[in-house]
Image (cartoon, grey):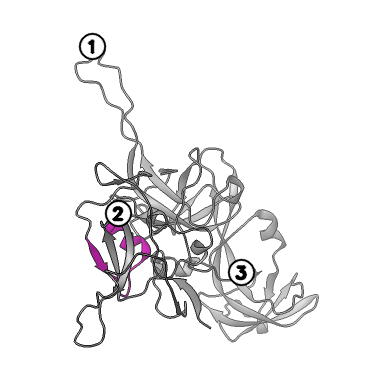
Amino acid sequence: MGKSIISLLVLAAAWSCGNTLADEIKLAENAPDRYVVVKGDTLWGISARFLKDPWRWPDIWGLNKDEIKNPHWIYPGDVVVLDFTGKTPHLRKGGTAGNGDGGEADWRLMDAKLSPTIRRRSLAIGAISSIPSSAIQSFLVRPLVVGEHELNSAPTLIAGPETRVVLSAGDTAFAKGVVWEEQAGWSVFRPGRTLIDPDTKEVLGREAIYLGDAQISEFGEVSTVLLTKATQEIAPGDRLAKTPSAQALSYVPHAPGSSFKGRVIAGPNDSVSEIGSKEIVIINRGSREGMEIGHVLALYRDRPSVIPANAIDTTEKVKLPAERYGMVFIFRVFEKVSYGLVLNSTRPVNVLDVVQAP
């Protein structure tokens, strides 16, 4: 069933000096007059062509709280226009780039009267995502971060068939501690890294390494388990967890409170010492600190202290302001930690770098 999609949104914002909108939204240098959306684009990437701070795209499009619940209303072939007509500049959609007769652009809507319009199109077909979904797809459901209580109480595989110690897809295994639940899906995991706050030394949780999927074919004090998928070898001692629901990809960027501050405590795995753009970082802040999916954080790194020029005391050192060098987009939140995607980074991210409100 098609859903109503807002197809034309107008931002009523005043224009001030320096190509700055009234609420401090600044245009990028050499921002184009228009851009044709292509397959593989994201709302973040398109906005970066027009804005110095691309995470502000909900503001430049003027999305309200209802519209940002599902902002996927831009499709390949749509034309995004930076419109300077009238007293206030704004972004709008201006028709499509091709009309099927020789690839000529269809600009008929570009000179139309600016007003909200509606078109119906299935959200499942072709709409572009907010951020690069391929970079985070494997992290949307897995891995989990579990506390010690969850880890200790998780159902445990106690044996394989014929005392086998290496199991794979299609094998039967046996587990203790499984509680019946209608239509529950199960994942097999193994306790992984312990995540520790570098400042307070608090244990924030354990990463659960995903090993595969399973079905419970018979419940009991010892339950019979059918392993339906295996991404790694599975063995007695591994744990079971209910498979969480996949999250939607309608991520709308917004800033946390101005006092928010945290640190990068890990990358996607321990073999990575420097984390690059479009890679995953783990932050030592979660839902208990107010972290939300869609929060945008600025990355900072301390600069070394320096001896001031012409200093009388050559032992005097002055701490320089921290260097801001990138952005992190939070896409998955647990109680005490969050997972983020590095965007717009000009240098590799290191563990212990600071994140805070942009």
Residue 8, percent from left and from top: 39, 67
Magenta residues? Answer: 33-50
Residue 127, percent from left and from top: 40, 74
Q: Is residue 320 above or below residue 273?
A: above
Residue sitting farthest toward the top: 312
**Three-letter code, disc 3:** Pro
Q: Earlier in the sequence, mark 2 or mark 1?
A: 2
**Three-letter code, disc 2:** Pro
Q: Residue at x 31, y 32 (%)?
A: 304
Q: CA distance from mark 3 to mark 2?
A: 44 Å
**Observer-nearest of 62 and 222:** 62
Residue 256, percent from left and from top: 50, 46
Residue 26, percent from left and from top: 30, 47
Badge 2 marks a residue whose secondary structure is loop
Q: Earlier in the sequence, mark 1 or mark 3?
A: 3
Q: Is residue 356 above or below residue 53?
A: above
Q: Which residue is mark 1?
A: 312
Q: Which mark is residue 244?
A: 3
**Three-letter code, disc 1:** Ile
